Image (spheres, helix red, strand yellow):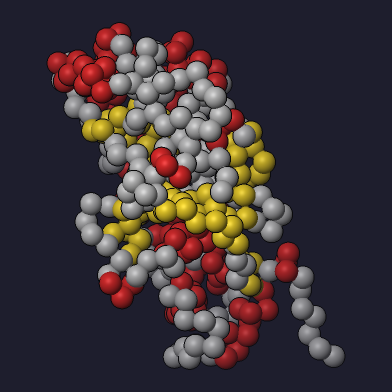
Amino acid sequence: MAARVPPERDLAPLQALTPARLRERVPEITEAEARRLLSALHRELGPGAQLRNVRRSAREAVARVSHVPELRVVARAASELDPFVKLLFEGADGARFEAVRIPLERPGRFSVCVSSQVGCALGCTFCETGRLGLRRNLETWEIVEQVRAVRRTLDAAAGQRVHGVVFQGMGEPLSNADRVIEALHVLSNPSTLAIDARAITVCTAGLPAGIRRLAAEAPNVRLAVSLGSARPETRRRLMPITAAHPLDEVLAAAAEHALATGHSPLFAYIPLAGQTDTPADAEALARLLHDFTARAGRRPRLSLVPYNPGRSDSEHRRSDAPSEAGFRALLAEYGVSAHRRYSGGSDVAAACGQLAATA
């Protein structure tokens, strides 16, 4: 009698597993075989590749319990303003989500901005994804596959490679913490995608429990926190999650993360005209940063992110150049340095805050 082939829904997506997790599913294979099999998968050698020191029985055992699902690339949009490229994916259920290929300063190196959810439930008013609501969480393999798909757009022969990953696409990563943390382990494992964990950043709108999990389960990964505003009332208006998790709670968790991991967090701040770029905002932000440094023993990095309007109507406007320059000058007077992040790909809706799963 022929062996029963399990339905696809019962098979484990192979690209979502580390060698240790693969051995949990297939105990009869050795650790070395698990590493070699996954290395071959992520080097995309193909199922017919000759693998030395991997028994045929081991390959067959893995094939019985796993498969390699694929994401459909619906559209690819290359910016005409800069070397940013956006990929639009579609899952088997028709759900759509996006990833962005980001060029880094060193030629040939790229970072991938990945999505962790289809839509988002948090409703931050300066984010186009937040207007969509939440459809579902992405599976671990769907997160990993975004990086693999972007890697296929690179010219490996010319030395191009994925150097880092940022969880700043669609969704709140720590609302999908189980799958995101699994993806972090796959992305950074030497036998899989081998991306240095210190080159991976998870950005959150502020979920304290998730921040603490990140410190405990992925301590080498970097943390970024979207501040919105250093003034509680303004932040509550911009980021509804503040009602459930006040900024003080978020900063306390971020300080614990810094103490536990030794990594300074990145604080992302969007100057909005007349709302978060005033002298009072600069004073409050500087006080927040100094207080955090005293609490955590580490100075957080501050990144000013230009506001990028989405396709929907918005009540927000980007702080103009003179206002932003004045804001940065005030911060400097208070002893705070701020880096202005370049947010590219705005002509194809690939810039920060613009992702909305549209072609």
Where is residue 220? Give x, y as percent.
34, 50
Q: How many marks?
A: 0
Up-down relation of residue 102 to residue 284 (above or below): below
Say which of 266 and 359 sits in front: 359
* Left or right, 318 with reference to 37: left
Is 140 on the left or on the right of 187, as rendered? Answer: right
Q: Residue at x 52, y 61 (%)?
A: 145
Camera-side residue of 232 and 321:
321
Percent across and percent down for residue 177 are 54, 44
Name the image quarter holding residue 292: top left
**Residue at 39% across, 60% down:** 188
Q: Position of residue 164 (x, y in %)?
A: 35, 54
Q: Residue at x 46, y 30 (%)?
A: 309
Residue pictured at 42% horizontal, 32% vertical: 308
Asked whether residue 173 appears in the rendered view, the answer is no
Where does the N terminus fall, quadrant-wise? bottom right
Whole-percent x, y for residue 172 in the image = 52, 38
Left or right position of 109 against 96:
left
Q: Nearer the viewer, residue 307 or 183?
A: 307
Outermost right residue: 1
**Quarter holding residue 90:** bottom right
Q: Which is more toward the observer, 300 or 160? A: 160
Q: Is residue 329 above or below residue 355?
A: above
Which residue is outermost to the top? Answer: 280
| Picture quadrant where residue 298 is located | top left
Specify whether residue 69 is in view. Answer: yes
